[in-house]
Image (cartoon, coloured by chain):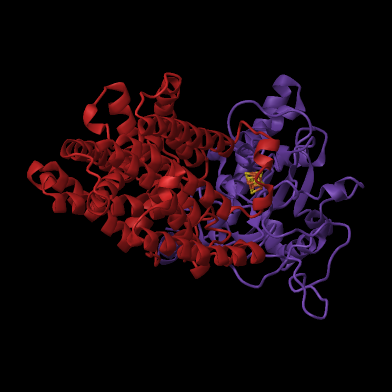
Amino acid sequence: MDVKRRKFLKIAGLSAVAGLGVPSAFTNLLQGEALASSSGQGNPAEGHKPAGGHGGHGEESTGTQYGMVIDIKKFAEHQGLADRCINACHTEHNVPDFGNPKDEIKWIWTDDYAHGFTEHSQYKRNAGLNELPVLLTCNHCANPPCVRACPTQATFKNEVGVVVMDFHRCIGCRFCMAACPYGARSFNWRNPREKYANGNYKFYKNGVNPNYPTRMRGVVEKCNFCPERLAVGKLPACVEATGETKAMVFGNVNDPNSEIAKVLNSNFTIQRKPAAGTKPSVFYII
Amino acid sequence: MLEKALVGNNKYWAWIFFLLGVISIGGLFYLYQYNYGLGATGMSRDVSWGIYIAQFTFMVGVAAGGVMLVLPYYIHDYKAFGKITILGEFMAIAAVAMCIMFITADLGQPMRIMNVILHPTPNSMLFWDMLVLNGYLFLNAICGWVILNAHNKGVPYPKWVKPFIYLSIPWAFSIHTVTAFLYCGLPGRHFWLTAILAPRFLASAFAAGPALLVLIAMLLKRVANFDAGEKAFQKLGTIITYAALANFFFLGLEFFVAYYSQLPGHMHTLDYLFWGHEEFDNLVLPMRFSLTIGLVATTMLLFPQIKKKEGMFALSCAMLFLSLWIDKGVGMVLGGFVPNPMGRITEYYPTVPEIGITLAVWAAGALILTILFKIAVTVAADDDH
Ligand code: SF4
Ligand code: SF4
């Protein structure tokens, strides 16, 4: 489908149109809306509702819900930044590299906009946008189907809204992988701790980070928003890797005074597969 | 009664040892998979369930199919099923045992299987599936064994099993409904996300289970001198026909909804399964083959003249069983993973160890079935004297 659409777009010559400026119109529109609603209700938290509303229907969750805003434009401006984020995460969490797609494990990765946002229209969009690389990861959904599906509570939502895993409880049934609408989960198809005869790890190319456990074979894993770093007041590894670019903003989306709430308040953001009702906590500025 | 399984002719023992051989080879493959991890299979990040779960799903159907004998016999007192009902119950036992083996073979950490009980999680359909499957195994074991035992002693079966028999009927529906819930409640998999999945599962189960039983009963007629009776065969044929019709009707509904609505998510997997999606078409041939022989077999079964000829009846049952096996035991589960959540396609090729383990589970099921049927047939034969 997507390939054909992209081809069509190219044939139509629409790729010449610099459509990236279009969303800024939305931004203005949204700001108007946000101002109107906050002046009416006197509640600044109301302002991010139009953005948050994408994530599903019904009530917003209360309490802490960590989330992330990813600014695609900033990543396009800073070549190589996405790879630095991926590396930072995968090194931090001892994500093994098996060197083949069948065994692949990834916590955060890039795909183009068309594949990252399959349920957003790509019809008559400019090819520049459809082919723009987007960082994808676990959305730490406010209403996570993976948690619902897990028969052992090895996957659960913790008190700050992060969907985390207990590697020691997981039985490796992979029900959560079937349940996740975002392909965010990976499975240890083989033993990541395998070593060469000389004692070196086969699949941890950069060695092992002692601050985070390695996994055994037969369990599922995914992005966990770095609870081990949050606990000591640090930002997640990927967010830290973006440095001063502000390409990623992390924080409690339910706290109206947080930086992320302000970003959500003043930008047009979208989420992946809003119709799935999962209420993703990862937002994108396009 | 178990001793009855220990006497048999050479053919019987040759068959038993053949099955044991297949099981041992599969056991070695399993040992390899256990040590290496599930990477020994063809599954991947994108197609994270493969032939094990597909076979599991199909076998739940075969197990549920047993109820098509239990229900007429015990509820409607349909006497013609007097001899064959016990076979239905025993087939259900073997099928559920296979389900449990397939699930275990599919686990990344099989030693932790008890975690499902230690940390009961009612919001997980897998938890309920475990409960209903084990419950069904228990119910059929109780009913089948007690009734056969009474029969063996020449006394009527004790009254206390009656509630268990009645319970086993809705329970049979429940096992396949909950198995459908494993799939149809997942928000991101459009192919599975259909309210008609459970009815479709049941319809295919009520065709596939009895079709297999017809074939086995015909075999028993030849090799074990056990005749279930022409009336029972014909009635089963009718049940199979209507279940198959319902199954293909439901499948047709899926096609209508997908292609009339033109919703991309609904169309993609059907495209992939029956026409090929982009350049990927691994399953197109098997799926078209399945649909064709299934429809032909159902049409054949509609004609009483065909159904009355033993050879033709057997052929249509075999074709229908194969058709449903491909549809549910291959296409249904694999299709759900194509395209993946990013709209990309990864195809799946089962590996040799994976096929070896699958065959071993089938052989283990056949072994259980053989032993149970041997006992049942011997009891029935003693009865005739
Ligand atoms: S993105 Fe997937 S894995 Fe992450 S919380 Fe949502 S459903 Fe679970
Ligand atoms: S694979 Fe592990 S985390 Fe996923 S559903 Fe099964 S037990 Fe839960």
x and y percentages locating residue A48 in the rendered image: 69, 34
Q: Quadrant of the C terminus of chain B?
A: top left
Residue B141, compared with residue B48, is above or below; it is above
Q: Is A189 or B307 nearer to us in this picture?
A: B307
Looking at the image, which residue sits at the far bottom? A198
Looking at the image, which residue sits at the far left? B305
Residue occupying the point 72% across, 37% down = A265
On the picture, is A157 further left or further right than A11?
Answer: right
Q: Quadrant of the N terminus of chain B?
A: top left
On the picture, is A67 further left or further right than B105?
Answer: right
Residue A123 visible in the shown view: no
Residue B153, compared with residue A14, is above or below; it is above
Total marks shown come to 0
Residue A91 visible in the shown view: yes
Residue occupying the point 64% across, 25% down = A59
Q: Is B357 or A230 nearer to us in this picture?
A: B357
x and y percentages locating residue A45 in the rendered image: 74, 29
Q: Is B289 or A114 nearer to us in this picture?
A: B289
Looking at the image, which residue sits at the far right? A232
On the picture, is A244 further left or further right than B103?
Answer: right
**Chain identifier of the purple chain:** A
Residue B346, compared with residue B153, is above or below; it is below
x and y percentages locating residue B68 in the rendered image: 31, 33
Q: Is A47 or B77 nearer to us in this picture?
A: B77
On the picture, is B207 further left or further right than B363?
Answer: left
**Chain identifier of the red chain:** B
x and y percentages locating residue A236 in the rendered image: 81, 52
Residue occupying the point 49% across, 37% down = B137
